[in-house]
Image (cartoon, helix red, strand yellow):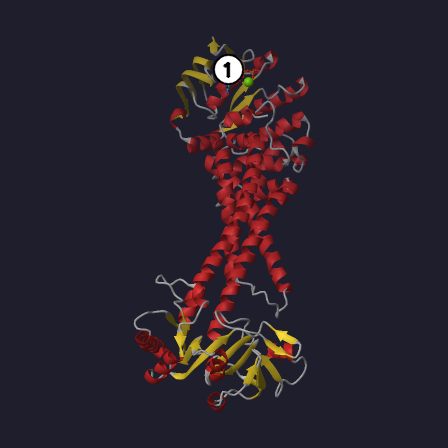
């Protein structure tokens, strides 16, 4: 259960201030598949970062499964990101010069769970259909493949929530659809999915749509 | 523990990814550690050489020299080595009469002048006049011929015993015994030849390998003085060295009417004096080496700052998947430490190899010293930590969002 309560986020650049989120409240239940739609600059990524514990709100509270993120220190937030959240980014954000296997196992470096890392990574790479590209580096993979590697990385630590910020934004519509189906599959297996997209047809396939405009939520 | 191992692995892979750059910044450390280990080894080498020289002088030695050699703080007064001697025959006789259980009390005078044989002149040979016993105290044994004796002294004999270096110079490849040499227009007959002494030099005194020694009375006669350059004696055993020293001092204070213009030195005092000088030398060499290491360290800091800035996005990614500030700090610190430790290892291997090339009879007093090698490694690791700290803190403090957005 994710509870966003009266959250505002103000960015300061020099003397000027910019209100990226203005008194936003929203609830997302466990196991939901939510699509976030909205024009560029409306604050979608900002909201994702706050839910993902990468940044803190200027006002309001964010509560995830009973934990109030505002109160967590750096170490606790890092653990939260490591254990609870899997991020998928538009530009993949894989470590360049590092192969698929190492990229996927990266969250396990910072985890206290005692997996056999390679076994776990290979198991997940099978789910995304990339078990034959273990030794490839990001620049030796197609965009769709890179995005599947980053989904595998998001999944490796078994998080409850997947935050995907325009994961199909850099892919053609066919590949984008494959990525969407993959997320849908994960949702069927019980993960909470929050998907930011500009693609209406994809958003309509989600169970619920949240529309964001000018830092607020349209009902 | 797990994160430490991962950090080491990650450090190696990112250092290997930029081989040329890692190598060049490592080179600065290699040079710095090489300087440290060689200068420190040299300092320790000189120290042990000097200490050996002093212990080789003889056992339970007590020596009187003109001037005040030790300042009140225990430092060395080098100026006391020069100038007119304040010691006389009177002092020698008084000690002989009153310090009863001192053995082999002997006296020596240092003459200025050159030694000549026909057209060959030696400027380097120290010209000494000594009483019997002097040669025993300073362990001057004979290669051939005889030592000076009481007879020579009583008759003001014009005879000398010479050192092997002097003999080689004045009488190359000849038997010097019975040969004539000339000092201050006086002819002397060579009656003895000293054995070669291995210890390189004699602190504060003449080089006994290059020496011409005549009876003390002869020396006084041709210089027309009764002055004395050194009075030396041997205490009966190690325990009585300090007591003899005190007795000699009391006698001399009386003959000098309370003025302490002389020094009574034991080997312990000599070690103290030279130790002070050596401490200064070690500190200077250490400072020199530290500067070179500082330059290497700045190179490391520079390269780490560049690396952190280039890898901002990587830092953002790591934070997004759960790296704490501590984990990022550790990663970069270990990276710079591995860089400097490798540099240190390369430096000491190279140094060890270079030392092994120095021939055993080389005059350079440099030896392999495990303490120095260990110290060098510790220094190299410390440089990595100290100069890697600021870049690593910078990396750890990066805001995850800003880092992820970094182009
Ligand atoms: N670090 C920052 N400093 C200042 N302003 C910022 C910062 N980050 C975001 N903003 C501003 O906040 C607003 C919302 O940004 P955000 O990235 O959330 O938009 P978005 O809805 O994700 O847009 P897009 O669809 O283009 O990704 C933008 O106008 C942006 O300029
Ligand atoms: Mg965005």
Count the marks: how many?
1
Chain designation of label 1: A
Residue A178 appearing in the image:
yes
Q: Which residue is mark 1?
A: A43
- Residue A166's place in the image compared with A120, above or below, is above
Dot 1: element? loop
Residue A110 appearing in the image:
no
Residue A75 image position (x, y, % from top left): 43, 34
Relative placement, left or right, of B47 versus A129 is: left
Q: Going 52% across and 44% down the picture, which residue do you hit? A: B334
Residue B328 image position (x, y, % from top left): 50, 37
- Residue A169's place in the image compared with B265, above or below, is above
Quadrant occupied by the C terminus of chain B? top right
Residue A125 image position (x, y, % from top left): 61, 33
**Mark 1 surroundings within 10 Å by alpha-carbon count, few (fewer than 14), some (14 through 19), many (20 or more):** many
User: Which quadrant of the figure has residue B70?
Assistant: bottom left
In the current view of this chain or complex, which residue is farthest to the bottom?
Answer: B151
- Residue B243's place in the image compared with A187, above or below, is below
Q: Closer to the camera, B141 or A28?
A: B141
Q: Closer to the camera, B141 or B249?
A: B249
Q: Going 57% across and 16% down the picture, which residue do you hit? A: A197
Q: Closer to the camera, A39 or B329?
A: B329
In the current view of this chain or complex, which residue is farthest to the top?
Answer: A219
Residue B168 image position (x, y, % from top left): 64, 78
- Residue B31's place in the image compared with A215, above or below, is below
Q: Closer to the camera, B45 or B219?
A: B219
In the image, the residue with mark 1 has its CB under 8 Å from the nearest atom of ligand 1: yes
């Amino acid at each position: 259960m994710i509870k966003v309560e009266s959250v505002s986020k103000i960015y300061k650049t020099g003397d000027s201030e910019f209100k990226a989120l203005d008194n936003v409240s929203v609830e997302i239940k466990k196991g939901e598949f939510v699509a976030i739609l909205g024009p560029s600059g409306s604050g979608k990524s900002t909201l994702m970062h706050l839910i993902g514990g990468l940044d803190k709100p200027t006002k309001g509270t964010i509560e995830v499964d009973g934990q109030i993120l505002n109160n967590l220190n750096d170490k606790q937030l890092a653990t939260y990101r490591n254990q609870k959240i899997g991020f998928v980014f538009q530009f993949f954000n894989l470590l360049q010069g590092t192969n698929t296997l190492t990229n996927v196992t990266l969250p396990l470096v910072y985890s206290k769970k005692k997996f056999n890392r390679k076994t776990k990574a290979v198991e997940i790479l099978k789910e995304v259909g990339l078990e034959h590209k273990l030794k490839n580096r990001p620049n030796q993979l197609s965009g769709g493949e890179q995005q599947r590697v980053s989904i595998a990385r998001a999944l490796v630590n078994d998080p409850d929530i997947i935050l995907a910020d325009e994961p199909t934004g850099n892919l053609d519509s066919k590949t984008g659809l494959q990525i969407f189906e993959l997320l849908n599959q994960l949702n069927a297996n019980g993960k909470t999915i929050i998907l930011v997209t500009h693609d209406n047809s994809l958003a309509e396939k989600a169970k619920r749509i949240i529309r964001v405009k000018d830092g607020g939520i349209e009902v | 523990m797990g994160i430490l191992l991962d950090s080491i692995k990650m450090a190696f892979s990112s250092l290997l990814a930029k081989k040329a750059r890692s190598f060049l910044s490592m080179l600065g450390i290699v040079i710095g550690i090489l300087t440290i280990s060689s200068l420190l080894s040299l300092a320790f080498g000189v120290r042990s050489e000097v200490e050996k020289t002093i212990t080789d002088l003889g056992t339970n030695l007590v020596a009187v020299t003109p001037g005040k050699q030790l300042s009140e703080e225990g430092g060395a007064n080098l100026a006391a080595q020069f100038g007119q001697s304040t010691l006389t025959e009177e002092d020698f006789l008084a000690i002989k009469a009153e310090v009863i259980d001192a053995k082999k009390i002997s006296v020596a005078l240092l003459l200025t002048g050159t030694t000549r044989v026909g057209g060959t002149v030696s400027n380097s040979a120290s010209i000494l006049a000594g009483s019997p016993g002097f040669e025993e105290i300073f362990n001057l044994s004979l290669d051939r011929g005889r030592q000076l004796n009481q007879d020579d002294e009583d008759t003001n004999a014009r005879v000398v015993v010479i050192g092997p270096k002097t003999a080689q110079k004045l009488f190359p490849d000849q038997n010097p015994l019975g040969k004539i040499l000339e000092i201050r227009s006086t002819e002397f007959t060579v009656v003895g030849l000293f054995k070669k002494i291995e210890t390189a030099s004699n602190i504060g005194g003449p080089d006994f390998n290059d020496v011409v020694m005549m009876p003390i009375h002869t020396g006084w006669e041709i210089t027309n003085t009764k002055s004395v350059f050194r009075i030396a004696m041997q205490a009966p055993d190690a325990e009585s060295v300090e007591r003899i020293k005190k007795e000699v001092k009391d006698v001399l204070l009386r003959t000098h009417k309370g003025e302490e213009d002389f020094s009574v030195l034991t080997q312990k005092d000599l070690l103290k004096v030279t130790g002070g000088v050596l401490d200064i030398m070690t500190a200077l060499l250490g400072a020199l080496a530290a500067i070179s290491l500082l330059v290497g360290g700045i190179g490391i800091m520079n390269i780490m700052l560049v690396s952190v800035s280039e890898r901002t996005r990587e830092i953002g990614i790591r934070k997004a998947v759960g790296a704490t500030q501590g984990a990022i700090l550790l990663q970069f610190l270990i990276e710079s430490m591995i860089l400097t430790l490798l540099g240190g290892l390369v430096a000491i291997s190279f140094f060890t190899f270079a030392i092994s090339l120095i021939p055993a009879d080389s005059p350079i007093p440099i030896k392999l010293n495990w303490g120095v090698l260990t110290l060098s490694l510790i220094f190299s690791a410390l440089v990595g930590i100290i100069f890697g700290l600021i870049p690593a803190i910078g990396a750890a403090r990066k805001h995850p969002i800003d880092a992820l957005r970094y182009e």
